Image (spheres, rainbow, N blue to C red):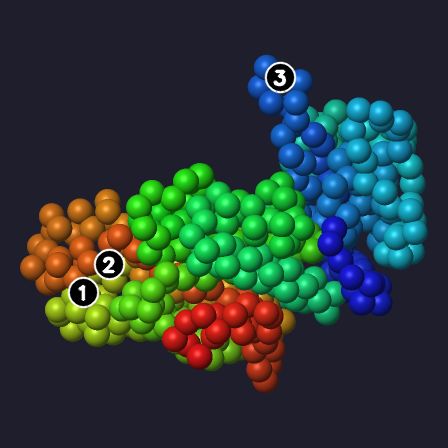
Amino acid sequence: MTATADLWPLFPDHIKQLQTRAERLFKRENLDLLAIHSGQQKRWFLDDMNYPFRANPHFKAWCPETQLPNAWVILKPNTRPTLVLLSSPDFWHTTASLEGAPWLEEFHVEHISSPEAIEKLLPYDKKNAAYLGEHIEVAKALGFENINPDPVLHFFHYHRLFKTDYEIACLTQANHIAAEGHVAAADAFFNGESEFDCLLKYMAATRQGQNEVPYNHIIGQNENASVLHHWMPDKKVSGSLKSMLVDAGAEVCGYAADISRTWSKQHNEYEELIAALDQITLALIDKMKPGVEFPSLHQLAHEQIANVLFAFGFVSCSPEQMIEDGITTVFLPHGLGHPLGLQVHDVGAAQADERGTPIAPPSGHLTLKTTRTVEPRQVYTIEPGIYFIEPLLQKLANSRNKHLINWRRVDEFKPFGGVRVEDNIVVYRERNDNLTRQTALDAYVKKVTRLA
């Protein structure tokens, strides 16, 4: 769970706000009960071992302990939420201890001796009840007909982007923990250690293993920094170290940090490219305000990237032509950012309203999954990048625009892989809070780079 005591005074109001949302939903959808299933263990194919447990994010919204398989949150109108816990003896596995947990005071707690015993706590007539969870076979066996109904999911997904004070505190703590990992990984890189060794240093600093974090750590050195999801860290260093891109987070009570930083082994032009991306990140964050449509920020990112591509001599045409011809998408193929919360790519990013009306991405930018209008108390990542990705460059080399590219300059930078700088931002009505720049990582970056 990795939480500090100052979270718990905020938790009662968090539950109160979730209940207020649920009451609206009960009336709107004529529901008498919501059964939110944490999930259950999944077994490897033809084996007696289980995959790491991942709790249903709808369950995590209510319960800060994420390692509770076969648990439930039961919601009824005008009633205190019920937390149902499996309490059967198990000498094979370690189970989470909730003894003395202060947040339990917000629940009526029931204990069941077997997963099947949940049936005794549910109504026989489930006409006006709904199941939220992954295990459809469980829901059907219990007699639910309303299983993950779209109106319920759309409602919760839409409102989940608006964070309570408790949620923001969790995200803040997650950023501080992840920052310690980034500093440790960078130290290992500057000491000449491999991707795998940098990963070990990251985990040692955060005290969170690979199965406890919101996504697999991405640590790519040299050319591997061009692989957007490089999840197979090399255990040895081959050749001289030039660069390292780290995209890694941490988790507190189910809430994610998602931070990226890029490092240059030497003070050189590549470090200047990192500095340019850092300034773009900060400039885009400054433009992110309530009422701004996220696609417009994405478009602005491509304008800024085009300016850098021209300034560094990678592309010879105007920034306007780069964007019109899709050249910038070769160097920045992913979206500018995404909502952050209970999931690292939090849901509801493309909903116009609580009914789930979709907002399509702009033409030519289909990889942008975040299309909502920015509003107060939402949390986003901002993560522009410039990459030298071989398959995309090959496609560009075979296009009608190949003469616009300075291939000698591109070849000079290909051994470095690419650059990404990513911060986690809370949007308020009058200001933005950059959770990432409020950590030890910011001082470390300025210490070891030309950003000082």
To which residue does mark 3 refer?
47
Q: Quadrant of residue 359?
A: bottom left
Instruction: Name the one closer to the observer, 391 or 105.
Output: 391
**Residue 103 image-quadrant placement:** bottom right
Q: Nearer the viewer, residue 262 or 229?
A: 262
Name the residue: 56% across, 46% down. 200
Residue beneath disc 2: 413
Give the mark nearest the N terminus, 2 or 3: 3
**Going 44% across and 39% down the picture, which residue do you hit?**
235
**Which of the 4 image quarters holds residue 413?**
bottom left
Q: Which residue type does callout 2 highlight?
A: Phe
Q: Are marks 3 and 1 in contact (CB under 8 Å)?
A: no
Percent x, y of residue 13:
81, 67
Element marked by disc 3 = loop
Cα distance between the residues tagged 1 and 2: 10 Å
Q: Nearer the viewer, mark 1 or mark 2?
A: 2
Disc nearer the start of the sequence (1/2): 1
Q: Is residue 105 above or below residue 119?
A: below
Q: Which mark is residue 314?
A: 1
Q: Residues within 10 Å of mark 2 (few under 14, many from 20)?
A: some
Q: Position of residue 102 (x, y in %)?
A: 89, 57
Residue 191 higher or lower than 304, as above or below = above
Q: Residue furthest bottom?
A: 430
Asked whether the viewer can see residue 346, the reply is no
Q: CA distance from mark 3 to mark 1?
A: 51 Å
Left/right placement of residue 209 relative to residue 360 reads right
Please provide percent x and percent y for residue 447.
Answer: 48, 74
Q: SS class of the residue under badge 2?
A: helix
Question: Could you tell me if the residues under marks 1 and 2 are in contact, i.e. CB atoms within 8 Å?
Answer: yes
Amino acid type of the residue tagged 1 in the rendering: Phe
In the displayed structure, 124 sits above or below 48; it is: below
Q: The disc labelled 3 sits on which kind of residue?
A: Asp
